[in-house]
Amino acid sequence: MRNYVQPGDSLAVSVPYTGGVTAGQGVLVGALFGVAAVDGAQNATIEVQTKGVFDLTKEPALAITAGARVFWDNSNRRITTTATGNFQVGLATAAALAADATVRVVLLRVPASGA
């Protein structure tokens, strides 16, 4: 096909956060969510992975069950199970205890609204 551009597993985005991001952190640009492949300062163009399974920082003291819908809390830059005001990014592939710092998430392309 002449109009084919790329697979879309990773995309170049501009880092939206003051203080930038480090490799492995979630990044939300509009309704596009991915995991930073490299460190980047605010407004730098970096690659984010939009597909795959990642261990991502979660809300402290929150237990998450395997298979739960998970959302990106962009204000705190972490995974939560609270839909309201957040962006669904995928599903938890393994349970996370309240004491755990991260949760394993499979990224799924989903509507931007958490509702």
Image: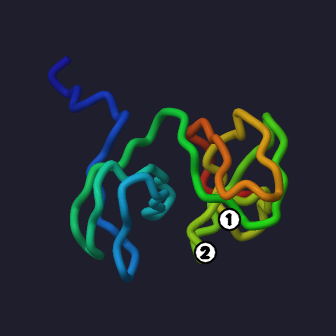
Q: Which residue is mark 1?
A: 86
Q: Residue at x 29, y 54 (%)?
A: 38
Q: Is residue 37 left or right of residue 111?
A: left
Q: Provide the secondary structure element on which disc 1 rests.
A: loop
Q: Is residue 7 above or below residue 48?
A: above
**Which residue lies under the disc numbered 2?**
76
Along the line of sight, which residue is nearer the eye, 77 or 100? 100
Say whether residue 37 is left or right of residue 73: left
Query: Mark 2 falls on what kind of element?
Result: loop
At 49% from the left and 33% from the top, the residue drawn is: 52
Q: Farthest residue toward the left?
A: 2
Q: 31 or 93: which is nearer to us?
A: 93
Q: Is residue 111 left or right of residue 43?
A: right
Q: Residue at x 36, y 80 (%)?
A: 19
Sooner in the amino-acid sequence: mark 2 or mark 1: 2
Amino acid at dot 1: Asn
- Compared to residue 18, the image places residue 105 above or below, namely above
